Image (spheres, rainbow, N blue to C red):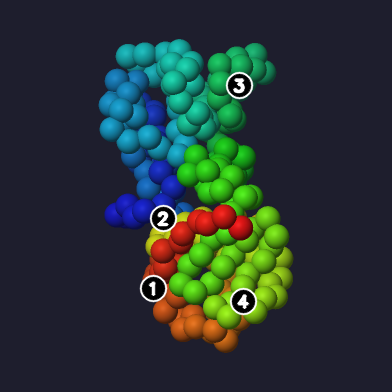
Amino acid sequence: MPENSSQQRLLVVDDDKGLRETLADFFEIEGYAVAQAANVREARAHLTATEPDLMLLDINMPGGDGLTFAVEVRSRSAIPIIILSGKGAMVDRVVGLEVGADDYLAKPFELRELLARVRAVLRRAKPAEVQRAAEAASQKTARFSAFAFTPDQRALLGPDGTPIDLTGAEYNLMAAFIDRPNRVLSRDIIADLTRKDDWDAFDRSIDTLVSRLRRKLAVHADAAQLIQTVRGEGYVLAADVRWTAA
């Protein structure tokens, strides 16, 4: 799957080619961009070129100890790390977490459990750009098209200054778009960001939520052009966002 700017990036570091490819295929289907490394040397090269949002790291590889590498990575980066290991003993789990890993999963594991852990770690970690946006939003107003959105007041104003009432889920969706303008957000990502933990790929609640927000914006602007559907991928706020003093 080709990478786009909305995808969160994973780096899978494991000498087992079959497992690497299985994980890559699974997470790409789930909407992530996945890079692979067969050993510590390749992993270092990937990290030098592009910093991922999360690394899945096998600690038992030839050509370099995974635990030592985890310490090395943690000493210079806050990249979330989930350790994958054939060793499931409590002492190994404790050591893995103490060297700076965010989670530890013993092999063999269920792919859906790993996905849940990846999502949980990413939610806790928050990408640096999202943190910066959240800090800015706590003090400022986001202006897009002719609208004004002030997160700390949970306020959205139309072009004429008229308040637009939002439900909690609509507010979370608006905030997600504001933090990521001009980036396609998949339904899975929207579900995570709007806290719809019970969402699955076969219901239409995300589409319904987007439609509700569009209708409220449409009173004041062409919402179909403002929040666009990207077929097969998700939705995008097609507008530049400018932060100003509240």
Q: Count residues near mark 4 (Cα–Cα under 10 Å), then give few for <14, some for 14-19, many for 20+.
A: few
Q: Is residue 217 visible?
A: no
What residue is pinned by disc 2? 6
Q: Residue at x 68, y 55 (%)?
A: 152
- Work out whether mark 3 precedes mark 1 in sequence or the reverse, and give the earlier one: 3
- Work out whether mark 4 precedes mark 3 in sequence or the reverse, and give the earlier one: 3
What residue is pinned by disc 4? 161
**Residue 97: image tag:** 3
Return the residue found at the far front.
245
Which of the 4 image quadrants contains residue 64? top left
Q: Residue at x 56, y 68 (%)?
A: 148
Q: Amino acid at mark 2?
A: Ser
Q: Nearer the viewer, mark 2 or mark 4?
A: 4
Question: Callout 4: helix, strand or loop?
Answer: loop
**Residue 231: image tag:** 1
- Decide which of 3, 76 is in the foreground and name it: 76
- Work out whether mark 3 precedes mark 2 in sequence or the reverse, and give the earlier one: 2
Q: Nearer the viewer, mark 4 or mark 1?
A: 4
